[in-house]
Amino acid sequence: MSFRQKLLFLFVATVLVCVAVMSLSVYSTMRHSFELANQDRANSVAAQFRSEFQQRGDAVERKVEAVASSDTVQRIAVDVNRGSPDSSSYVTEAHPLAAQHQLDFLELVDANGVILSSSQWPAKFGYSEPSASSATGPSGPFLKREELPSGPALGLFAIRAVHVGEQPLFVMGGERLDQGFLSTLDIPTGTRVLLYQNLDAKWNPQNLLDLNGPAAGADRVEPLIEKVRSTGREAQAPIYWTPDFADAEFFHAIPLSGPNHQLMGVLLVGSSRRPLIELERRIVSTAMLVGGLGIVMAVLASLWFAARVTRPVVSLAEAARRVAAGDLSARVEVESHDELGELAASFNRMTEDLLQQKDRAVQAERVAAWRELARRLAHELKNPLFPLQVTVENLLRAKKKSPEMFEEVFHEGTTTLLAEINNLKNIIARFSEFSKMPQPQQRPTEMNDVVQSVLMVFQAQLHENARIEVHTDLAANLPEISADPDLVHRALSNLILNAIDAMPNGGELTVRTAAVRAGESGDRVAISVSDTGSGLTPEECARLFTPYYTTKQHGTGLGLAIVQSVVSDHGGKISVESTKEKGTTFRIELPV
Amino acid sequence: MRRIALLSVALISLVAVANAATRPRYGGTLRVAIQSAPTTFELNSATTPTDYWDMTRMLALVGDTLVNVDALDRPLPALALAWRSDSSARRWEFTLRPGINFHDGSAASAPAIAQILGALHPEWTVRSAGDSLIIETDAPHPSLLAELALPRNLILTRNSSGIPSGTGPFRIVEFEPGKLLKLVASDGYWGGRPFIDTLEIDFGESLRAQALSLELSRADLVEATPQSPSSSSRIRTSLPVELMALVFAPNSKADIHLREALALSIDRKPIQSVLFKGAAEPTDSILPNWMSGYSAAFSTRPNLVRAKTLLADSRPSSLLLSYDPRDPRAQLIAERMALNARDVGITVQVSLSGSADIQLLRVALPSPDAVLSLREAARQLVLPQPSLQGNSVEDLYQAERGLLDGKNVIPLFHLPLAGAVGPRVRGWAPDQLGGWNLPDSWLEDSRLAESRQEDSR
């Protein structure tokens, strides 16, 4: 990962973390606020329903009062006080009275608590109604479980006593608390009311009613109702109907108690969470959109900033790579005056110093090379010049002092002069040859053939020196390479000649070829020439390919330089491994 | 009890005599309203006691039986003036009233009557012998006279449309099935021409509508809810000639203990006093006391403790109780039964839908003859026919006990029939078995009737 990528990652990560922390904080605060708002709304609605419930109770009271004041009830009250009333006359009286006053329940009960007439269960005449007889005066509305032919029901009741004589007549009327009752309540939009009729000892989902009858999904409300049933106090909780939170409702459960504080029912006022959830979702989606855009912009800004920050570093790295590659002319543009600018300036100064040092080194090396060349030339030329000088002096001395022997001396002297002159020519020819290295004429070449032709050339010389044993290890199926076989032949000849020179007392000469496959620089063919001579020191190995450097007394120091030049012209490489007193191996690798 | 019944008969007769003190007048149209709406004149099509009584009353206006019987099961002459039987009661000989014709003009001769009766009773041998009619049965038939007095043995001929023609006081002149029956007085009626010229009977009127029609003088004679004898002078109540009972369906899931517990849970007294206004007789027997004389031997008192004990061994279940929706009292009575049943822990749902376990039924007891009524009741209650070992009251009691032992039927009440007449109807003396007995009634002049009505207020 590059410095720029790291910097970009750091910037982006920082932005994401900041956005996430901020979002979570805002979201948490928002949710808390929404929960409070929702709860306040549910409490408000619950309070409204308590008030509504009280009003309905008051309405029932007024209706019962109206029934008690009716002529029919007054007449019955008079009859009751006359003694031995005709009960058969009253059996059907309650029903029309209840219908007239829109009451679901109405019973006329005598002073002994015996039902004279019942609208909800006309057949109940003659049965006792303890609730009525226990009423001593006007009492507020109360909840009561009422037995009906179809089963128990829950009602909101009121009792009035009609006194027209000694025997009071009780009028007990009420409204049924069921889905019909719920439908008459003024329910705000987004609010739902459920009623649990606590008619059974155990939880019964059929007793949970909504506007249409038994409510669906009653089991989800069971824990809330059970809590109210067990504590007798109000409770509230969100009810999740589906996995979608927007379908959830916040329910406020209000216990509905009877006269003796027994729990008769539970009124559940539910506020839909959908508006708040949808608002929350809109806010979240907007925040996500804005946050996303912010993140994108932050990433873009980070990209720009990272690029701006890392550009000098990248330039520095690029310049450093160029310097490492040998290009000491690499420079970094100084764009700022901060630490990076100072670093760039220092780099530039460093490369300038390096360049100057290199120039000085090259100059010194050139001088050294010239000195070496001069030394070699002097050395090479001095050796033949001295015999020439001695021969010419002998000729002059013989002409002057021994004319009789001049002819003989002249003959010997001219022979020597010609030989030394010829030697000088050879020296000059080798220098000339080194300066005139031809460009390789490459063509498909079988390297094993080249090796064998070279060995063939040296066969006679190797046979003369019987103490050198030749080994060849040529790889079969060696691929052809594109090479100039003459130049390669010349290079290999130099290596074999060096090997022979390295083993004046005999030894083993080994020539190997091999295919080097799947390297980073492609397939290659390797040729190694090993001897078992005296070997070289590491210092000698380091300078071995320097022109005019030689470890031999009579070498020009150009042989291995020519080999390196040939190998380099073919895109190959040459290396040397040597161990003192054990031998040296030259290894050439040429591309296929 | 029989004395009480006779006393009641005497009192009602005195009232009838008092009403008849005004001099009769001929003419006028008597308007009658009934609940049932027959489309034919077949007694077999009567599905409820109300239909049965309405049809028998209408057919009795048109036709006659050979003999009549009174509330004491005493035979009275009708088409037959005299009768005798042999000692084995297998052969009966009737001397017919001479010179009687059907409304269509044909003679109601012995051969014609023998043919009609022979068709009604293929198991008998019916033949004429001059002006006499001879009936022979395979087995002794001591109740033959009561049998012949049943409405199903009315001597009627029918035309191609099924309209009956008989020898009764009125003849049919118009019939709109399900709507109306119009009759006119038969001038040649052997008992004397009726005072009323025309009878118009409107079908399908509910009791409430009938009461309203009577109040508004749109009807002169209507059916009424039985009342205690002192409740209204214009309402006439018969002897109890119907049985109201709970009848278990053959496939009912109630076992014998549950049935008995249900029977013991029912408190008949409040129903009798409040819902029937004292007009019904609580009972646990099929036959009413005036008919059998032993009804008191069947206890009607509830026993909740015993019922709960029985239920301890019984499988709890919910029973469905249905009732006749045309009977205005039936629903309330059924709900009261359910309420009583709940007191001992039996769940009874009153409903008209679904397969009922129990039905609240009324069955007609058509004859004052106890044996005949017991047989007829057993047939209507889908009980096996009673097996009588003899003709004694003990035999009858044992036979009835045998019918009730299976607890398939819980008798509840014996109910009378009742009718009410408007102010212009005079001389109305319905018989004690529920018959209208209209030939002796007449219509008062309307202005006089209104005057009387004002005076009575």
Image (cartoon, coloured by chain):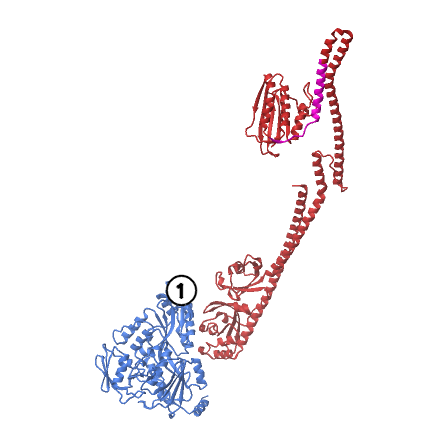
Chain colours: A red, B blue
Image position of A504 with respect to B339: above or below: above
Which residue in the structure is indicated by mark 1? B317
Where residue B203 sits: x, y (%)? Answer: 40, 81
Image position of B236 with respect to A339: above or below: below
Where residue B239 sits: x, y (%)? Answer: 35, 81
**Quick check: can you spot residue B41?**
yes
Of residues A170 and B320, the one drawn nearer to the viewer in this rendering = B320
Where residue B17 sits: x, y (%)? Answer: 36, 89
Question: Would you identify the image quadrant in which residue B218 lies?
Answer: bottom left
Classify residue B278 as left or right of residue A19.
Answer: left
Is A442 in the magenta? yes
Classify residue A182 as left or right of residue B131.
Answer: right
Is A197 in the magenta? no
Span highlighted in magenta in the image: A415-444
Q: Amino acid at mark 1?
A: Ser
Of residues A230 and A360, the one drawn nearer to the viewer in this rendering = A360
Which quarter of the figure is the N terminus of chain A placed in?
Answer: top right
